[in-house]
Amino acid sequence: MSDPAHEFTLSAWVDESVIIDGLRCPGGTYTLAAAVVETASATRMRESLRDLTLAKGGRLHWVDESAKRRDRIAAAIADFDLAAIVATGSPVHRSKQERARRCCMERLFYELALIGVDEVCLESRTSTPDGRDLRLVDSARDKGLIPHGFRVGFARPRDEPMLWIPDAAAGALTAARLGEPRWLLAMSEILTEHEVVVR
């Protein structure tokens, strides 16, 4: 009889990055990234991620990091035993960000369910957009895109270091779209991108 404490399960942590339609990125891009990890290994990864912070009790936040720090963070994440699954949607106009998020989330959740993820943690925004995300989850279940056992919850980056991984993956892909590909190249062995047309 197998020990439930040692059963292999996959969990995912999800964060986004957005470029609005403009001169630097015509059409814009919505990037929704997931870090997929064997659930039991997340505790060790959290410890490693905390070791990368500049101050005790601090957090990693891609947009605030220097280029040198981004080099270090990207290299560390590339060495983790994980997969980064990304859905990128375009075009993204200022008034259509939530539409882009819905399109990307449906595709991302479908891909996560295909590889056996059964629990997802999204970065919490506020109660209203979190509620919209949960309604989308219900809709995806009704459409058969994800199984009924597919669970979705929320956490804040200050409390959950695993959210720092998709933040970095999404940030690296956004940087590549804006002309700096080096961090995306550093993570290329662990990252799979799925493109979505936002209608």
Image (spheres, rainbow, N blue to C red):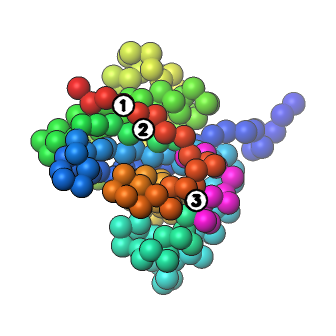
Which residue is the site of mark 2?
87
Label 3: how many residues lie within 10 Å, few (<14), some (14-19) or many (20+)?
Answer: many
Label 2 element class? strand
Which residue sits furthest left?
95
User: What's the CA distance linking mark 2 and mark 1?
Assistant: 7 Å
* Residue at point 50%, 61% (across, down): 183
Q: Confirm or deny contact between disc 1 and disc 3 (CB under 8 A).
A: no
Q: Quadrant of the C terminus?
A: top left
Residue 12 position within the rendered picture, expressed as x and y whole percent measured from the top left: 53, 44
Eye-nearest disc, 3 or 2: 3
Which residue is the site of mark 1?
196
Q: In this picture, which residue range is highlighted in magenta?
A: 75-84
Q: Confirm or deny contact between disc 2 and disc 1 (CB under 8 A).
A: yes
* Residue at point 61%, 30% (across, down): 115
Residue 11 picture quarter: top right
Residue 130 position within the rendered picture, expressed as x and y whole percent measured from the top left: 29, 44
Which residue is the site of mark 3?
186
Q: Please state which of residues 141 and 3 is positioned toward the viewer in this rendering.
A: 141
Label 2: how many residues lie within 10 Å, few (<14), some (14-19) or many (20+)?
Answer: many
Label 3 element class? helix
Q: Is residue 32 above or below residue 187?
A: above
Q: Please state which of residues 52 and 139 is positioned toward the viewer in this rendering.
A: 52
Residue 142 picture quarter: top left
Residue 131 position within the rendered picture, expressed as x and y whole percent measured from the top left: 27, 39
In this rendering, position of residue 7 left or right of residue 12: right
User: What's the CA distance linking mark 3 and mark 2?
Assistant: 19 Å
> Which sits earlier in the primary sequence, circle 1 or circle 3?
3
Amino acid at circle 3: Ala
